[in-house]
Image (cartoon, grey):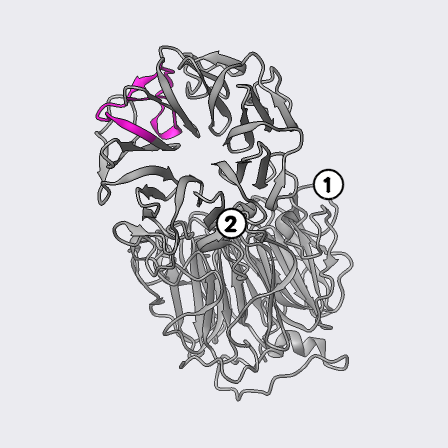
């Protein structure tokens, strides 16, 4: 008899650890035994992380989607760009269960095969792949010396497996004793957990591990600071201890720092971190040191936990959720806060559930997959997270200027009206399509910071709105504004620029004025004092263009020289300085900026890149090879975008989020490449992971990541209710979704 650990796979198909004959799939009925439903599998068929999802099909094929891949997480140049919709993992057959780390930065995955072997891929810094090394890998590896596995789980940087003989084996990071071998020594090969027998299932949190024994008891070890071991203390345990007061348990689950148990009576119990309502009850403490019953849940048969939210599946095929509500994680169509479990509306016939960091999944009896939550990295699988080719900004024409922030855009039309879309700087609902900014007319230029916006009017005044905690709106206060207000004491402006939380204005007399945050001296007044009204940047005249990004400010003078001030945490020695010339750059006609570097266009059409470094450690600018007829440049986080004299756009850099404007197999396609099908471009705007091109006909197109709807295509990357994932076949009963195809 097999026991459940997070997925009611018996309702999907029969998966058995030993030589037991396969059973026919069973449809859930009122007369079906809930206990037998819970006890007949140790498999997880859905798994998710911060930007990546996996699903096991009935035939044993493995499907993936999102921003990661079945290749080494640390070898970016070798890493394949995964589709924003599901694609089959080549060469992976007869998978029966998957698990994924709850840590994005240390990401790794495990796949249990029908023959009891385990394959692993992803980060390997602590040996969590179990191949005897900490070396980067360019593909899946088989965990060494491990056979007969029936249950696997991936922690933050460690891995756990239960074998058919009831023993438990662990490998990877062991700083908190999460390997359970009585030490804190990291292991690159599996070691046996001491003192545990009769185990039928395992699970792993970030830095702790748990095991379920065949007698229905739960055992835990590793970090206990937040109560995740359930023993009533905050102690770290180097060897397993029994979780007191829990009997009759048939399933266990953990992904973050909260632990869960499902009992044979259908009740759910939780303990550990509760800062976001993960325990499912309104307790005053954000840490729960012993198991408490999650109220309002009966007849549950399966659990799936993300780091901060939980899904519970009832025997009737309905799904219940609780915990973190941001991004639509709970699937009820709202972002309402609350601790009590709530049913996901209009979702029926579910047979398995899965949870990532920012999304949730449900597999239905008909083989269809539903998902909801944040799709910023493609983890939901609907394709709304990115556009790999230029896509029109909907409902906007006659555009004359556009400025890109990290997660929003501000555009000016020929009639002087201002339009914006993407993230709301004040934390409200995002806008996936342009909306008009009320109260502004006569606009000619715009700028977008991280969470504030600027507009220059034809009369030379500057208007601002958004967050104002550092005085970046220039109105003499630190109060946020939802509507535009004038920057005080500023006139005759001809250009504006916005950094993370500071602002710049260029006046007609060639002087530059600044206000807002000043942590890196980015206001150019040789201080670090915040300014809520404009101050003149010292020692600059004859300026014709200004730029800002992060805490860096840059000015281009009429003589073609480039001047910079401010900095970045990686290049800050604590000493504010007056503007200094960027040596090695001359005859510059245009500049594009990122917080740590700048791209310069020279009069001869060549493109050069300079990186911000600590004083005395600067290196000369380097030419971006392959361009001699450039007329414009832009800088996204991972690419340099170049506008050529013929109106085409070319680029170099990473394509993980589609910033190159075409599909690619490699994360970093070599050399410069043209954005296919894009002509007639007049100017470029880029920031974060997205790029926009303004065409000569006044239309605007965008490509790259669609975080907060920043591309303006009218498609939201947030799914507040379950949405069907476009699979090329049914995961159950498809009849033609075969691993050998």
Vertical side of 112 occupied by 603: above or below: above
Where is residue 333 drawn, in percent x and y?
A: 70, 54
In magenta segment, residue 236: no
Vertical side of 715 occupied by 58: above or below: below
- Say what secondary structure mark 2 lies in: loop
In magenta segment, residue 583: yes
The residue under the point 34% across, 48% down is 648
Mark 1 and mark 2: Cα distance apart in space: 38 Å
Where is residue 153 drawn, in percent x and y?
A: 49, 63
Neighbour tally class for label 2: few under 14, some 14-19, many 20 plus, Cα within 10 Å: many
Q: In which quarter of the image is residue 31?
A: bottom right
Vertical side of 198 occupied by 640: above or below: above
Neighbour tally class for label 1: few under 14, some 14-19, many 20 plus, Cα within 10 Å: few
Residue situated in front as seen by the camera: 420 or 242: 420
Where is residue 488 drawn, in percent x and y?
A: 58, 14
The residue under the point 75% across, 46% down is 282
- Which residue is identified by label 1? 284
Q: Is 81 on the left-hand or right-hand side of 736? A: left
- Which residue is identified by label 2? 706
**Do we see residue 238 in this rendering?**
no
The residue under the point 61% across, 47% down is 227
Where is residue 419 drawn, in percent x and y?
A: 59, 37
Q: Where are the magenta residues, as a range?
A: 561-590
- Say what secondary structure mark 1 lies in: loop
**Do we see residue 263 in this rendering?**
yes
């Amino acid at each position: 008899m097999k026991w459940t650990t997070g997925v009611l796979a018996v309702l999907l198909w029969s998966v058995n650890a030993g030589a037991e004959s396969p059973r026919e799939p069973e449809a859930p009925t009122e007369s079906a035994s809930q206990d037998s439903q819970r006890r007949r599998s140790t498999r997880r068929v859905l798994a998710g992380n911060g930007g990546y999802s996996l699903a096991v099909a009935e035939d044993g094929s493995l499907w993936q989607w999102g921003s990661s891949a079945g290749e080494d997480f640390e070898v970016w140049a070798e890493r394949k760009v995964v589709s924003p919709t599901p694609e089959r993992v080549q060469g992976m057959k007869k998978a029966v269960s998957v698990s994924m780390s709850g840590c994005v930065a240390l990401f790794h995955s495990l796949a249990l095969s029908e023959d009891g072997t385990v394959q692993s891929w992803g980060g390997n810094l602590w040996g969590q792949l179990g191949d005897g090394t900490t070396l980067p890998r360019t593909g899946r590896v088989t965990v060494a010396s491990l056979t007969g596995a029936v249950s696997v789980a991936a922690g933050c940087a460690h891995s756990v497996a239960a074998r058919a003989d009831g023993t438990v084996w662990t490998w990877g990071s062991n700083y908190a004793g999460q390997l359970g071998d009585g030490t804190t020594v990291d292991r690159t090969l599996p070691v046996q957990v001491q003192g545990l027998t009769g185990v039928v299932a395992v699970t792993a949190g970030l830095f702790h591990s748990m095991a379920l024994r065949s007698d229905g008891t739960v055992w835990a070890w590793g970090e206990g600071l937040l109560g995740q071991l359930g023993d009533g203390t905050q102690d770290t345990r180097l060897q397993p201890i029994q979780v007191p007061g829990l009997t009759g348990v048939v399933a266990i689950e953990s992904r973050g720092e909260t632990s869960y148990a499902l009992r044979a009576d259908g009740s759910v119990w939780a303990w550990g971190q509760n800062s976001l309502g993960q325990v499912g009850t309104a307790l005053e403490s954000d840490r729960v040191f012993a198991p408490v019953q999650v109220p309002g849940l009966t007849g549950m048969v399966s659990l799936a936990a993300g780091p901060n939210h939980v899904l519970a599946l009832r025997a009737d095929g309905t799904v219940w959720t609780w915990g973190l509500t941001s991004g639509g994680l709970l699937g009820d169509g709202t972002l309402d806060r609350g601790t009590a479990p709530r049913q996901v509306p209009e979702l029926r016939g579910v047979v398995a559930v899965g949870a990532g960091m920012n999304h949730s999944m449900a597999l239905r009896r008909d083989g269809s997959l539903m998902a909801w939550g944040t799709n910023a990295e493609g983890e939901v699988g609907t394709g709304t997270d990115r556009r790999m080719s230029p896509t029109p900004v909907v409902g906007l024409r006659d555009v004359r200027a556009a400025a890109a922030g990290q997660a929003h855009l501000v555009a000016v039309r020929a009639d002087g009206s201002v339009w914006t879309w993407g993230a709301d700087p004040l934390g409200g609902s995002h806008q996936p399509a342009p909306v008009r900014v009320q109260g502004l007319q006569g606009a000619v230029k715009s700028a977008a910071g991280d969470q504030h916006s600027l507009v220059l009017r034809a009369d030379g005044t500057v208007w601002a709105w958004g967050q104002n905690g550092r005085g970046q709106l220039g109105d003499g206060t630190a109060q946020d504004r939802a509507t535009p207000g004038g920057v005080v004491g500023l006139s005759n402006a001809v250009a504006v620029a916005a950094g993370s939380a500071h602002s710049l204005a260029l006046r007609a007399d060639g002087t530059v004025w600044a206000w807002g945050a000043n942590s890196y001296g980015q206001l150019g007044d040789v201080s670090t004092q915040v300014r809520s009204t404009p101050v003149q940047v010292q020692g600059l005249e004859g300026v014709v263009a200004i730029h800002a990004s992060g805490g860096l400010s840059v000015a281009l003078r009429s003589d073609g020289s480039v001047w910079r001030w401010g900095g970045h945490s990686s290049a800050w020695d604590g000493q504010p300085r007056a503007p200094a010339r960027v040596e090695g750059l001359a005859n510059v006609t245009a500049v594009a900026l990122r917080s740590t570097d700048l791209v310069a266009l020279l009069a001869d059409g060549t493109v050069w890149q300079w990186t911000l470094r600590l004083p005395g450690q600067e290196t000369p600018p380097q030419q971006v090879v392959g361009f001699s007829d450039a007329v414009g440049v832009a800088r996204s986080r991972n690419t340099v975008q170049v506008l050529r004299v013929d109106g085409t756009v070319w680029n170099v850099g990473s394509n993980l989020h589609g910033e190159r404007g075409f599909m690619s197999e490699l994360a970093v396609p070599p050399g410069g490449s043209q954005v296919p099908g894009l002509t007639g471009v007049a100017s470029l705007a880029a920031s974060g992971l997205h790029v926009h091109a303004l065409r000569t006909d006044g239309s605007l197109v965008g490509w790259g990541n669609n975080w907060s709807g920043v591309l303006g295509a009218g498609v939201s990357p947030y799914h507040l209710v379950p949405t069907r994932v476009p699979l090329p076949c049914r995961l159950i009963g498809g009849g033609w979704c075969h691993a050998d195809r």
